[in-house]
Amino acid sequence: MIQVQGLTKMYGKQEALRQLSFHLPPGSVLGITGANGAGKSTLFDILATLDRRWQGSVTVKGLSLKKENLKIRKFVGYVPGTWSLYPELTVIENIKFFAGMFGYPADRLQIPHFWDSLRDFSNMRSADLSGGMKQKLAIICAMIHSPELLLLDEPTTGLDPDSRSAIWSELLKLKERGVTIVVSTHYYEEFNYFDFLLFLNEGRELLYSPIEEILNGERATDEFYNKYLGECLKRL
């Protein structure tokens, strides 16, 4: 689904991403972690075709991210780290707006599992939703055109454990339908949902590996950082 070779991004003289390379098979979940400023959001902006000022090679479904970005946008859904829906619109009004942007009828909801938990709140202003409900609405709007690739920049940050678990339950159902998911997180217990892990530090790739090779049959917990990722940092 995604092939990245030598991806480098500069902000003036500041290197935000440095020679990043990885390959993600279709239908997989890639988890990205790293400290604030590691380059996670920069990578998401590039994959979402919002930033074209970078060096290297990136292809999505065999299409060049630089040369065929408009084609790629048709099968990519993106939920940025900053909540970006319209707070004064109701739940259903936000959905209708984004459906219209993609030329779909308003009643064409492509992810019924998320919608089931929001149906009773359809006439509530989105600003009045709980944090978990806001994130579910954002994912619905990102999925309204049935994208094959879903990009989620820290979708569970600030949510309670039950809300995070509910969102991941629905995301895994999307994976079962063949959707490729790229997600960033600071919650190490969420690593258990990944197929691949990318660990960034100051724009560099410290680790890219199938998660099963890292966990080796264990469950990821908060202690996982000190046990494994902390060792990666010590080798710098």
Image: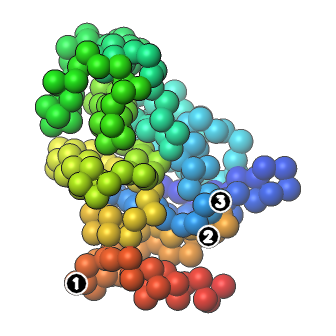
Q: Is any atom of residue 92 visible in this view?
A: yes
Q: Tell me the residue that label 3 is attached to.
A: 37
Mark 2 or 3, closer to the camera: 3
Of residue 232 and residue 85, the one placed in the foreground of this image is 85
Is residue 132 shown left or right of residue 59? left
Q: Is residue 87 above or below residue 187?
A: above
Residue at 76% x, 59% y is 15
Q: Is residue 221 above or below residue 97?
A: below
Residue at 57% x, 42% y is 45
Q: Tell me the residue that label 2 is attached to.
A: 201
Q: Quadrant of residue 36?
A: bottom right
Question: In terms of secondary structure, where does tag 2 sit?
Answer: strand
Q: Earlier in the sequence, mark 2 or mark 1?
A: 2
User: In the picture, which quadrant includes the C terminus?
Assistant: bottom right
Q: Earlier in the sequence, mark 2 or mark 3?
A: 3
Residue 165's x, y, as percent? 24, 55
Q: Is any atom of residue 139 visible in this view?
A: no
Residue 21's x, y, as percent? 55, 64
Label 2 to label 1: alpha-carbon separation:
26 Å
Label 1 to label 3: alpha-carbon separation:
31 Å
Q: Earlier in the sequence, mark 1 or mark 3?
A: 3
Tell me if label 2 and label 3 are in contact, CB under 8 Å: no
Within 10 Å of the Cα at label 2, are there few (<14), some (14-19), or many (20+) other Cα atoms?
many
Q: Tell me the residue that label 1 is attached to.
A: 217
Q: Is residue 235 above or below residue 31?
A: below
